[in-house]
Image: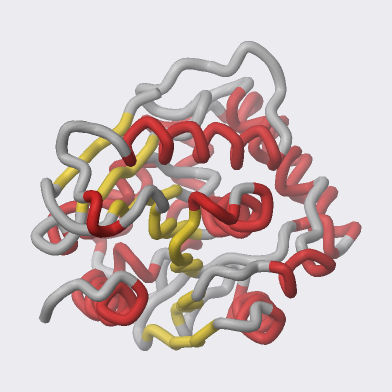
């Protein structure tokens, strides 16, 4: 498991990337939050520099892998015992779906959630599930580079600078491969979290770019409305990757959430 890390003190923050991404998507969070928290960003199993899983993983499998990562780093040499053994889990898109499942399967390990531009899963709609399952065949046909060039620009707002679009495409092209992407897509297609959202006990910040045309604001609103301890924030001028397109505003909201839930200092 490849993990990027920043910071030596404060609460543990675990960052889970979207289905077409990697730990590189959280460069701005590693840089911007590391002075207040111990920040980890994984390459999910079968992505980037992490090894391929030995077999298919469903959403529970990804959540359990994230749980093992939290356990491994809660007691590491840089651990700050004043913040307990749990983590504040920051998930973007698919990563947010994993984070929500993690919070219900391993509530003792989740001190808080930040769910960005996410959804309750693609299994909420047959057409969405079918489209998600079709992505693996598209990747196989096109290859990672052409696949990224086709899908990457959709993830940011129409006014996003070309430099950002290029980074998003490059991150996707270097991160996605089979069979890992196919396992991830199936985990999304098979998931409908709506029945379990009310059982999420962790305080949850839900963020969404106002120009997100991938999952859209309605999906984020559905999460915020179902989770009891939630706050909902629109990130203006951002598409599906609000954490990359408006990193300063995004990080400010995350730090505000941590001040409340983890009592980090100003």
Is 156 left or right of 164, judged from the image as shown? right
Quarter-of-image position of residue 186: top right
Q: Is residue 13 left or right of residue 126?
A: left
Q: Position of residue 102 (x, y in %)?
A: 60, 50
Q: Nearer the viewer, residue 149 or 27?
A: 27
* Colour setting: secondary structure
Image quadrant occupied by the N terminus: top left
- Give the residue displayed 59% in from the left and 26% down from the top: 180
Can you see residue 163? no
Q: Where is 264 relative to 84, above or below?
A: below
Judged from this view, the residue extending furthest toward the top is 54
Quadrant location of the C terminus? bottom left
Residue sitting at x 23%, y 58%: 82
Numbered disc total: 0
Position of residue 84 relative to residue 207, above or below, is above
Q: Residue at x 73, y 35 (%)?
A: 58
Where residue 45 appears, x then y in whole percent?
51, 27
Q: Is residue 10 left or right of residue 205?
A: left
Left/right of residue 221 with respect to residue 27 in the rendered view: right
Above or below: residue 179 compared with residue 260: above
Q: Position of residue 207 (x, y in %)?
A: 46, 77
Residue ranking furthest to the right: 126
Give the residue at x 54% y 53%.
108
Vertically, is 225 above or below 215? below
Q: Position of residue 67 (x, y in %)?
A: 52, 39
Snapshot quadrant of residue 5: top left
Q: Is residue 211 visible?
A: yes
Residue 2 versus residue 106: which sits nearer the camera? 106
């Amino acid at each position: 498991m490849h993990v990027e890390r920043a910071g030596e003190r404060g609460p543990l923050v675990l960052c889970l990337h979207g289905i077409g991404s990697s730990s590189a998507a959280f460069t701005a969070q590693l840089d911007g939050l590391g002075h207040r928290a111990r920040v980890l960003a994984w390459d999910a199993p079968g992505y980037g520099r992490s090894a391929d899983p030995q077999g298919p993983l469903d959403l529970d499998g990804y959540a359990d892998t994230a749980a093992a990562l939290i356990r491994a780093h809660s007691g590491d040499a840089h651990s700050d015992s004043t913040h307990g053994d749990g983590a504040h889990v920051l998930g973007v898109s698919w990563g947010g779906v994993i984070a929500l499942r993690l919070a219900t399967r391993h509530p003792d390990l989740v001190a808080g959630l930040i769910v960005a531009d996410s959804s309750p899963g693609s299994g909420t709609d047959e057409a969405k599930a079918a489209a998600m399952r079709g992505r693996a065949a598209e990747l196989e046909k096109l290859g990672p580079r052409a696949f990224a060039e086709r899908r990457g620009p959709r993830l940011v707002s129409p006014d996003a600078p070309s430099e950002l679009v290029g980074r998003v495409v490059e991150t996707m092209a270097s991160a996605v491969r089979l069979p890992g992407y196919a396992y991830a897509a199936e985990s999304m297609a098979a998931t409908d979290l709506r029945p379990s959202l009310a059982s999420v006990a962790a305080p949850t910040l839900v963020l969404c770019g106002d120009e997100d045309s991938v999952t859209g604001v309605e999906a984020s609103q559905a999460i915020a409305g179902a989770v009891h301890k939630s706050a909902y924030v629109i990130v203006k001028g951002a598409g599906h990757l609000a954490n990359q397109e408006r990193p300063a505003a995004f990080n400010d909201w995350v730090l505000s959430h941590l001040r409340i839930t983890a009592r980090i200092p100003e």
